[in-house]
Amino acid sequence: MSVTQPVVIKKAKVLVVDDDKIVLRAASEILSREGYTVVAIDDAVEGLSAAKDPSFDVAVLDIKMPNLSGMDLLKAFKQSRPDVEVIMMTAFATVETAVEAVKAGAYDYLTKPFENIDVLSLAVARAAEKKALRDRTRFLEEALNFKNQFEDLVGQSQQMRSVFKLVETVSYSTATVLIQGESGTGKELVARAIHYRSPRKDKPFVAVNCSALTDTLLESELFGHMKGSFTGATANKKGLFEAADGGTIFLDVMGDIPAATQVRLLRVLQEGEVKRVGANDTLKVDVRVIAATNVDLTKAKEQGRFREDLFYRLNVISVQLPSLRERPEDIPLLASHFLRIYADKMGKKLSVISTGAMEALTTARWIGNVRELENVIERAVVLSATEQIDLEDLPAEIRSNQKGGADVELFSLAHLPYAQAKKLAMRAFERRYLSALLEKSAGNVSSAARAAGVDRSNFRRLLKQYEVAGRTMKKGEGEDDEFDDGPDTGELSM
């Protein structure tokens, strides 16, 4: 299956329709200066034809126009392109008209003439970001539907596609599989995917963590024991190999099993039979073995810590799971997957991860891999007081990565395509630059804007976009720096 690239928030394409050519020209100039691609039309009927164009993200429509009203044009947009955000404009504002527009699906309602040039650009910026976030959510949902074919394995990176292909290939065989990868990469998920896609899917899948048991208990658990074979053996006990007969046994953390158990395990693989602890007779079992390790078994074999013959018996088919650091392009998918799981579990209406939060997640180091990411998202769902996960909902160590050194950041981005890595690196730099300016200016937004050589209103939008907070000036202290503007999705321009 081919999965499209994720949506990257970019400058939107905006359609402006107004029969007043002066207003049309002014709106076009304002939005073009902000970096938007603008198509200006002075006839509502032509605007109706443009409503079918799939490239528009936002439409700005005048309400009163000859031949066709803006309200009719709004309804046509919502019928042919319901994903487009529509902003209505009018010089004859009434409460009734505003309510009618919102009911018909309008995102915002503006009164002409505008109080200042920022009113229109801010409304478009908010609408464009909403459209982009919804597009990204749709992409993630489509990709997550694809992962359902592989149980709970999530990913669209080349490394994970190779894993999916290998899972498909080996599922219908009975060959032993060795899954290698760091802790938290999802080795058991791969084992389950193989089992449930195999002819054994209706038989038991038995998982055992070999490092969680003492030597004596491990043998008893795997092979069973007879009554009186050791202190505490008060009855005969069936082992996990017997319990998995006809199905699959998953042996996790194989690198830690003791030498004596390795010998007995080798016999199971060679002869297809087990011998309970304390028993004289053997029992035939039909079990497929899938083993996993987070240590280098080749090195352990060379050092004499792992039997060479057992290694080759286990390593018939090898699956190498990449760390999360090696596939950062899968982080948005995984984060959305866990967000949906924990939002449903906790009964919260959370469906979106903000741009700043997603960038922090994408550039984090993730030493604990997918398991660590899952814990971070669960924590964020618990803490979030809104309908989206924001940067402040993430742990301090994840947020601090946005202020981290360039070497750490570039290492995290090294496996991304150049264009995507460059965009993330630039945004991370801009956030750090803005934070440093504010710190140097003691939180004074106006002073920081002057130091940056950026218009104050543009600077305020950048702060909002990058989720960097300045302080509100006290009355009489200077300009009021409180900002409640929507995001400007352009790059910082000096």
Image (spheres, rainbow, N blue to C red):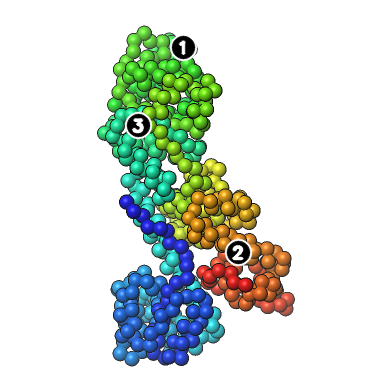
Is residue 22 something one can see in this rendering?
A: yes
Q: Position of residue 30 (x, y in %)?
A: 51, 82
| Element assignment for label 2 | helix
Kind of residue sitting beneath label 2: Glu
Q: Nearer the viewer, residue 269 or 231?
A: 269
What residue type is disc 3 on? Phe
Q: Position of residue 356 (x, y in %)?
A: 54, 60
Residue identified by numbered label 2? 430
Residue 266 position (above or below residue 444): above
SS state under label 1: loop
Numbered circle sitting on residue 230: 1
Q: Disc 2 versus disc 1: distance between alpha carbons?
A: 67 Å
Q: CA distance from mark 3 to mark 2?
A: 50 Å
In front of the other: label 3 or label 2? 2
Which quadrant: the C terminus?
Answer: bottom right
Q: Residues within 10 Å of mark 1 (few under 14, many from 20)?
A: few
Which of 450/74 is in front?
Answer: 450
Residue 205 image label: 3
Describe residue 452's horizontal placement relative to residue 352 as left or right: right
Question: Disc 3 or 1, which lies upstream in sequence?
Answer: 3
What number of labels is visible? 3
> In the picture shown, does residue 211 fall above or below 264?
below
Q: Confirm whether residue 335 shows in the render.
A: no
Dot 2 or dot 1: first in sequence order is: 1
Q: What residue lies at 64% left-to-right and 65% top-to-bottom?
A: 434
Select label 2 or label 1 by which is in front: 2
Residue 378 is situated, as x and y percent measured from the top left of the image, at 49, 49
